[in-house]
Image (cartoon, helix red, strand yellow):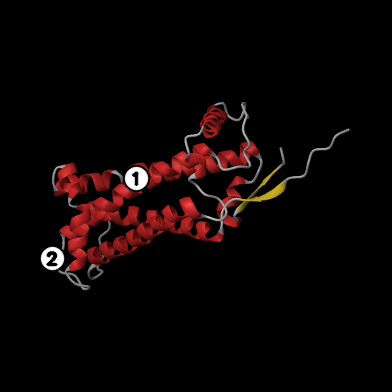
Amino acid sequence: MATMAEPTRIVRMSATRRLVHWSNALSIVVCAITGIYIADPFYVANIPYLTAWTRAIQLYGAVVLDVSLLVIMYLYFFSTVERPVAPLIPSRKNLIRLQEAFLNLITFNRRRRFDSSQPDPLNAVLFLGLHGLIVLQLFTGLQLYVFGLESGYSIVGSWWPALIHFSTDWTQAAFGGIGGVRLWHHAMMYPIIAWALLHVYYEIWRTIAWKEGDITIAFGGYKLARPK
């Protein structure tokens, strides 16, 4: 009588990617809370420069988010453990695996015709969408930041505001002026929050449905899977 093979550890995330993952998560939370406060102050306290401190905290959180995004862009192509770009290549194999991963989700694991031990193309597409939203937040946020530097100077010199103007002034033309940029920057926060909730749900769902410990990937870097 054949026995079922024991599950083995499969490394899926390096320590660097896990650090970037949690830096992303924390900075999104910080930027969301401070952004909501800046748009509509909901807390009043006898704290000197409360709004200024809130804006500073959001700026620092945004810097962490932007730097982590640059690291992610590098790891997309050069990670030594798992390259996120691999499942995004529009090959016939990846398209079939994307279709099967989607059908597996909407049928609540009743259809399982792909190797779940390997990177999930559906998850890769979802992350690509998140990174696209963050890129938009990056450009609109920097435009709002440089718009406040009316003098055209900064602590590091005039080259820094000039560089930001050069790379982000197009957002005013695209969104109908600084008011439109501010509106889009604020509005994009809500799909990012919705994405984060969807991501948490999907990871818990995969852990329960596939029974391969997917949720441990973000903590230990590995999951458990039986060889096919």
**Whole-percent x, y for residue 95 in the image:** 51, 31
Residue flagged by tag 1: what amino acid is it?
Leu
Front one among 51 and 167:
167
Q: Is residue 40 visible?
A: no
**Whole-percent x, y for residue 40 in the image:** 23, 52
SS category of the residue bearing label 2: loop
Which residue ends up furthest to the left in the rendered image? 151
| Res. 27 mark | none
What residue would you read off at disc 1?
133
Among numbered discs 1 and 2, the one appearing first in the sequence: 1
Q: Is residue 13 above or below residue 173?
A: below
Q: Is residue 100 above or below residue 157?
A: above
Front one among 175 and 207:
175
What residue lies at 55% left-to-right and 60% top-to-bottom?
Answer: 15
**Whole-percent x, y for residue 228 in the image:** 71, 37
Front one among 146 and 189:
146
Residue flagged by tag 2: what amino acid is it?
Gly
Q: Residues within 10 Å of mark 1 (few under 14, many from 20)?
A: some
Front one among 94 and 48:
94
Q: Quadrant of residue 25?
A: bottom left
Answer yes or no: do the residues labelled 1 and 2 have beta carbons within 8 Å? no
Q: Is residue 48 left or right of residue 213?
A: left
SS category of the residue bearing label 1: helix
Q: Residues within 10 Å of mark 2 (few under 14, many from 20)?
A: some
What residue would you read off at disc 2?
152
Marks 1 and 2, how far apart at CA? 28 Å
